[in-house]
Amino acid sequence: MTDYGEEQRNELEAIESIYPDSFTVLSEDPASFTITVTSDAGENDETVETTLKFTYVEKYPDETPLYEIFSQENLEDSDAEDILTLLKQQAEENLGMVMIFTLVTAVQEKLNEIVDQIKNRREEEKRRKEKEAEEAEKVLKAFQGTVVTIENFLSWKAKFEQEMVELRRKRQKEEEQSGKTKLTGKQLFERDHNLDTSDIQFLEDAANSVEVDESLFQDMDDLDLDEDDPDFDPVGLGSDED
């Protein structure tokens, strides 16, 4: 026959030696006590903490002890609910054996997980805020435009001029290939220096090509011309007077 009282007293002595600074007896009959459990320090030396209250029932450890969260620090309500669920699971799995140390150890590990989760939540929140700030900056730039400085203006100007030169070259090449290039007089003379003598050559060729009928002037001596006549105009240069 199991001596439940003896097993409970032996466990209490062991628990008090394991947790001397966090173990507190609340009552002796029924035996009730608290154990404060603190997580390891987080990234910013932050911790989470809970104080668990246990009460032995008559047939413990063949029956699960009563348990509750006596107090808590830096824990969300959802985290406290998770701890209670964990205690229930561990108690059912360890029926028939003294289990307070096992329950406290499981809660200790859970608190360490919660500290890591707090770190992850803070990092996610930081990334979310950074992303929102970037999006807000993009919207602001869309309305305000880029602030003009001497450096970025000169850079833009050089790039713009280079693009214009390339565009003119491209257009000129396309026009030459299509046979539709229209050159100015200056461009014509610059490309063909023979053009500056072309007009003179044209006049010389024209003069050499004119044929004169000399028979028209053979009877000039037979003409009765009065050179003393004031109206005499041998080449017809005179003008009619009204």
Image: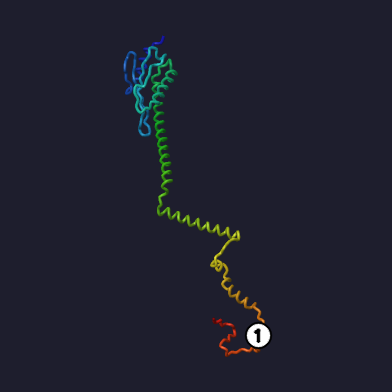
Residue 201: quarter of image: bottom right
Residue occupying the point 57% across, 63% down: 182
Front-most of 140 and 90? Answer: 140
User: Does the rendering let one see residue 108?
Assistant: no
Q: What is the count of numbered marks? A: 1
Front-most of 143 and 166? Answer: 143
**Left or right placement of residue 167 versus residue 152 in this view:** right
Q: Residue 77: where, in percent of width, then height?
A: 38, 25
Front-most of 232 and 54? Answer: 232
Q: Circle 1 is placed at which residue position?
A: 217
Q: Residue 33: where, in percent of width, then height?
A: 34, 18
Q: Provide the secondary structure element on which disc 1 rests.
A: helix
Residue 169: quarter of image: bottom right
Amino acid found under the numbered disc labelled 1: Phe
Q: How is the image coloured?
A: rainbow
Q: Residue 157: where, in percent of width, then height?
A: 45, 56
Front-most of 6 and 219? Answer: 219
Q: Residue 198: where, in percent of width, then height?
A: 59, 72
Residue 53 in the image: above or below residue 167: above
**Left or right placement of residue 139 versus residue 194 in this view:** left
Residue occupying the point 66% across, 79% down: 211
**Quarter of the image containing the N terminus?**
top left
**Quarter of the image containing the C terminus?**
bottom right
Specify the farthest residue to the bottom: 228
| Neighbourhood count class around disc 1 (C-alpha, 10 Å): few under 14, some 14–19, many 20 upward | few
Residue occupying the point 39% across, 34% down: 122
Residue 84: quarter of image: top left
Residue 161 in the image: above or below residue 235: above
User: Does the rendering let one see residue 129?
Assistant: yes
